[in-house]
């Protein structure tokens, strides 16, 4: 009975908000511009909501609490890197937006192809980008799976519910595009806010009297839980600083982050967005409180189960409708970023992978090709979710550090004298091979430093060396401005 | 009080009439003045950026306990709140 109530609420939330998203965009004609970057017309509030929707994912929702549960203070890096990533967005976002508008970019691979005048570099960036996006999407599908497992009180076939959620997300993306994602993101943000307020305030007040008492109890039970351990160990201060730095460049590196930047109406919207979002992201403190409460109320979870920490508390101590509401909000927190990820990956495939081989075909069937690519990406993610669930955390680490390797290319394109395309490609390939090696030997830190930062240093070094070794830095001619939707500025 | 049209322009993107615009419409781009980085901008973005990353080395402690929160957490909350202020100042200085 409980599982039916919880499930009904989850279903109502998902279907209702998706219906809202599709209704919001029903009169808009879908072109690739509209589908992928919302006609570059989002004003501050819609942009804020979209960024918040992309940043606060189910991994934040479950993972941050789980991290606080299993490790304590290292989880605070999530609270530290959000302001940092918004500062980077504030500094670099407007210029990226301007370049995108001048030359009609849809994807981050367009940016590379046009800035370094090389379609092959664009292809390389697109292939890597799709790979990382699929990994990230797998994480979101697993988030949905965890939430549905809990909402089902252990009585539900997870394979089938996961599949239904997956089909829903594809249908939604197919019809609504980025604008629909932004509108659903509004519903999602309200619901997630409610769920987090509940988990971070109601649970501590209910069981401990107040958050202050929660911390007092936590100090008794786990004295070392609220500070970082010593410097060079994994999860020490050095790890913390390097992880914040690597994650700070995330928004301007992830393909879906770049698509969100392109969707802005003007530069000022991006700046205002960066100024407003930190206020919203402070709710993450409450997620930590929820994780700490779970640690005291339900100790002993191990391995992947830590991600379920505070959901288990809700499941045990509260009625089914509360669980349904929280799980529904969590599912939206996976579906909204998931949709943005699928769109970004679909546009990369359509424009930078298929488009490079048959431009005329893609030009004639732009929207259709984008939509078919969307389905293809979703299928990839589904297969990877169904086959490789166990190695998920390591896959996400690879994806996040890997996406950060786009940063040198993004940054160096800001200067009039740019490195050659081949050096950027060499840096990217070199650092990704390094990351593959560290993943293969299971080495998350080197001398306490996050491997992502080491890989980025290597990336910059390779770019510099290749340029010094003959292919010198040379300045670019001025970009030509695209005339049609699928141009990358080379015509 | 905020006028309805102002509120609309904040909330709603360009609606159906504007959708006929070709993608080569640069009006927004031309209107936004090119802003340059100056010392004040770098200062006001650099301070919070360093505070939330390198500053951790100095803030990694439980005492003094503020409002029951461990110092590390209240330090990060403080900077999450200060970031918008710093960015606003940076934006203002860049526009001058």
Image (spheres, rainbow, N blue to C red):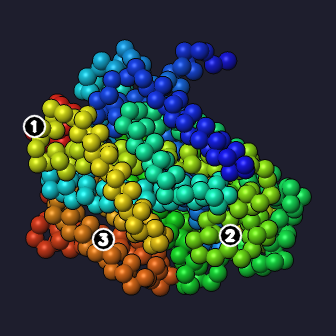
Please state which of the two labelled residues, at mark 2 or mark 3, is closer to the viewer: 2
Counting from the top left corner in percent of width and height, residue A94 is at: 39, 42
Residue ID at (64%, 39%): A190
Q: Earlier in the sequence, mark 2 or mark 3?
A: 2
User: In the depicted view, which residue is nearer to us: A293 or A461?
Assistant: A293
Residue ID at (47%, 85%): A447
Read off the residue under disc 3.
Answer: A432
Q: Earlier in the sequence, mark 2 or mark 1?
A: 2
Tag count: 3
The secondary element bearing badge 2 is classed as helix
Instruction: Report how far apart the C-alphas of labels 1 and 3 lie in the structure.
Output: 33 Å
The secondary element bearing badge 1 is classed as helix
Instruction: Report how far apart the C-alphas of labels 2 and 1 lie in the structure.
Output: 53 Å
Counting from the top left corner in percent of width and height, residue A294 is at: 74, 65
User: In the depicted view, which residue is nearer to us: A1 or B25?
Assistant: A1
Answer yes or no: do the residues labelled 2 and 1 have beta carbons within 8 Å? no
User: In the depicted view, which residue is nearer to us: A65 or A449?
Assistant: A65
Q: Residues within 10 Å of mark 1 (few under 14, many from 20)?
A: few
Q: Residues within 10 Å of mark 2 (few under 14, many from 20)?
A: many
Judge whether A391 appears above or below A126 on screen.
below
Read off the residue under disc 2.
Answer: A69
The secondary element bearing badge 3 is classed as helix
Rendered image: mark on residue A273: none
- Inspect this view and state whether residue A124 appears: yes
Residue ID at (57%, 71%): A304
Q: Earlier in the sequence, mark 1 or mark 3?
A: 1
Read off the residue under disc 1.
Answer: A360
Chain letter for mark 2, please.
A
Give residue A385's quadrant in the image.
bottom left
């Amino acid at each position: 009975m409980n599982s039916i109530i919880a499930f009904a609420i989850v279903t109502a939330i998902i279907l209702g908000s998706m219906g809202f998203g599709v209704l919001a965009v029903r009169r808009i004609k879908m072109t690739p511009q509209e589908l992928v970057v919302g006609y570059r017309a989002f004003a501050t509030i819609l942009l804020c909501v979209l960024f918040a929707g992309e940043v606060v994912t189910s991994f934040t929702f479950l993972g941050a609490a789980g991290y606080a549960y299993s490790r304590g203070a290292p989880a605070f890096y999530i609270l530290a890197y959000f302001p940092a990533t918004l500062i980077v967005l504030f500094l670099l976002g407007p210029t990226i937006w301007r370049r995108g508008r001048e030359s009609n970019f849809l994807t981050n691979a367009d940016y590379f192809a046009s800035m370094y005048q090389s379609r092959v570099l664009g292809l390389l960036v697109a292939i890597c980008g799709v790979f990382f996006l699929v990994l990230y999407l797998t994480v979101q599908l697993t988030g949905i799976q965890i939430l549905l497992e809990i909402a089902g009180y252990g009585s539900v076939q997870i394979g089938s519910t996961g599949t239904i959620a997956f089909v829903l997300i594809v249908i939604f993306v197919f019809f609504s595009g980025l604008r629909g994602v932004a509108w659903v993101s509004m519903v999602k943000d309200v619901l997630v806010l409610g769920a987090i307020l509940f988990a971070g305030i109601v649970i501590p007040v209910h069981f401990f009297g107040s958050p202050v008492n929660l911390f007092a109890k936590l100090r008794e039970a786990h004295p070392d839980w609220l500070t970082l351990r010593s410097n060079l160990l994994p999860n020490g201060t050095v790890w913390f600083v390097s992880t914040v730095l690597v994650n700070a460049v995330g928004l301007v590196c992830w393909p879906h982050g770049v698509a969100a930047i392109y969707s802005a109406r003007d530069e000022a919207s991006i700046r205002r967005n960066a100024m407003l979002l930190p206020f919203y992201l402070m709710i993450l403190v409450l997620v930590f409180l929820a994780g700490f409460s779970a640690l005291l109320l339900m100790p002993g979870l191990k391995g992947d189960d830590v991600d379920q920490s505070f959901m288990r508390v809700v499941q045990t101590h509260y009625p089914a409708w509360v669980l349904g509401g929280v799980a529904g909000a969590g599912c939206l927190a996976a579906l909204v970023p998931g949709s943005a990820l699928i769109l970004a990956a679909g546009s990369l495939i359509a424009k930078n992978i298929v488009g490079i081989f048959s431009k005329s075909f893609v030009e004639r069937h732009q929207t259709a090709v984008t939509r078919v690519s969307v389905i293809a990406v979703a299928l990839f993610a589904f297969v990877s979710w169904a086959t490789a669930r166990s190695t998920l955390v390591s896959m996400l680490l690879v994806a996040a550090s890997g996406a950060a390797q786009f940063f040198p290319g993004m940054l160096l394109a800001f200067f009039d004298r740019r490195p050659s395309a081949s050096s950027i490609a060499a840096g990217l390939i070199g650092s990704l091979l390094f990351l593959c090696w560290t993943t293969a030997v299971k080495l998350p830190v080197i001398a306490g430093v996050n491997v992502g930062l080491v890989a980025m240093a290597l990336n910059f070094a390779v770019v510099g060396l290749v340029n010094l070794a003959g292919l010198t830095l040379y300045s670019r001619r001025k970009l030509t401005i695209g005339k049609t939707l699928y141009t990358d500025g080379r015509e | 009080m905020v006028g309805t049209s102002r509120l609309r322009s904040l909330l709603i993107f360009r609606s159906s009439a504007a959708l006929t615009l070709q993608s080569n419409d640069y009006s927004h781009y031309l209107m936004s003045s090119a802003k340059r980085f100056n010392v004040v901008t770098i200062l006001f973005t650099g301070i919070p950026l360093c505070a939330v990353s390198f500053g951790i080395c100095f803030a990694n402690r439980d005492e003094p306990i503020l409002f029951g929160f461990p110092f590390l957490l209240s330090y990060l909350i403080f900077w999450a709140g200060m970031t918008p202020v710093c960015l606003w100042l940076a934006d203002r200085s860049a526009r001058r």
